[in-house]
Image (cartoon, rainbow, N blue to C red):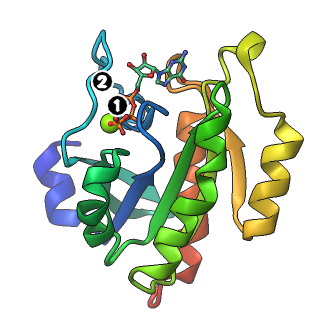
């Protein structure tokens, strides 16, 4: 199906925001879902990046807007403004970096305290390809997600493991809560 077909036939628009500390893999996560070749070296996002992708859900065409802000503190105001109108959020941390895990609550609070939305949120433990460097167990992360009332999934943005599943997990959570669906 051509891109113009999707433009004319998209039934829903979902805004998805990626949150998390710098270098946790937000941009890699987004590139992996888009099947793009990620950059060969780490380039911190400046401000915010954006990608769009069309998916099919129960015979409907959904246009996903993926907002990928920088995790750097100096851009938090920009990030907050893009939380308005969100339908779904991924809070991403690195399984190999405990300090990024300790900031999960900060990112969840940023969501809860900014624009009130009936959104769905998933905690994502990225870098699961580096099992020998893991600093956070599955159980510890799942306990945190449970305490925050959100879902948890482990992925690797590097080798693509569970990336599609994470997005579908989120879409399946968002869609039933939309009015008129
Ligand atoms: N091994 C491994 N490396 C990863 C993974 N995801 C990202 N990386 C590495 O982490 C670096 C940072 O990834 P980015 O996606 O740019 O990080 P970011 O969260 O967007 O960072 P900011 O834009 O600064 O907030 C990349 O250059 C990759 O080398 C992963 O799943 N596994
Ligand atoms: Mg980035």
Between 113 and 158, the residue placed more toward the observer is 113
Whether disc 1's CB lies below 8 Å from ligand 1 is answered yes
- Is 162 above or below relative to 105? above
Q: In the rendering, which numbered label is found on residue 36?
A: 2
Image quadrant, ligand 1: top left
Q: Position of residue 2 (x, y in %)?
A: 16, 42
**Residue sitting at 84 percent across and 34 percent down?**
137
Q: Earlier in the sequence, mark 1 or mark 2?
A: 1
Task: Return the mark for residue 50.
Answer: none
Q: Secondary structure at mark 2?
A: loop
* Residue receiving disc 1: 31
- Residue at left offset 63%, top offset 52%: 123
**In-image side of 179 versus 47 (left or right):** right
Name the one closer to the observer, 8 or 170. 170
Q: Are marks 1 and 2 in contact (CB under 8 Å)?
A: yes
Label 1, label 2: how many angstroms apart (C-alpha)? 5 Å
């Amino acid at each position: 199906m051509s891109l113009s077909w999707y433009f004319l036939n998209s039934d829903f628009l979902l805004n998805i925001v990626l949150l998390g500390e710098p270098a946790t893999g937000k941009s890699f996560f987004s590139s992996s879902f888009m099947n793009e070749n990620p950059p060969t070296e780490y380039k911190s996002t400046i401000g915010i990046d954006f990608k769009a992708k069309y998916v099919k859900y129960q015979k409907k065409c959904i246009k996903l807007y993926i907002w990928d802000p920088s995790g750097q503190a100096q851009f938090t105001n920009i990030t907050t403004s893009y939380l308005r109108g969100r339908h779904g959020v991924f809070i991403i941390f690195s399984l190999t970096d405990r300090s990024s895990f300790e900031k999960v609550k900060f990112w969840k609070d940023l969501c809860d305290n900014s624009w009130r939305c009936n959104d769905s949120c998933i905690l994502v433990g990225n870098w699961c390809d580096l099992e020998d460097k893991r600093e956070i167990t599955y159980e510890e992360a799942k306990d945190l997600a449970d305490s925050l009332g959100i879902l948890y999934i482990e992925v690797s943005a590097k080798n693509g493991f569970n990336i599609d599943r994470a997005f579908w997990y989120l879409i399946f959570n968002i869609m039933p809560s939309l009015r008129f669906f």
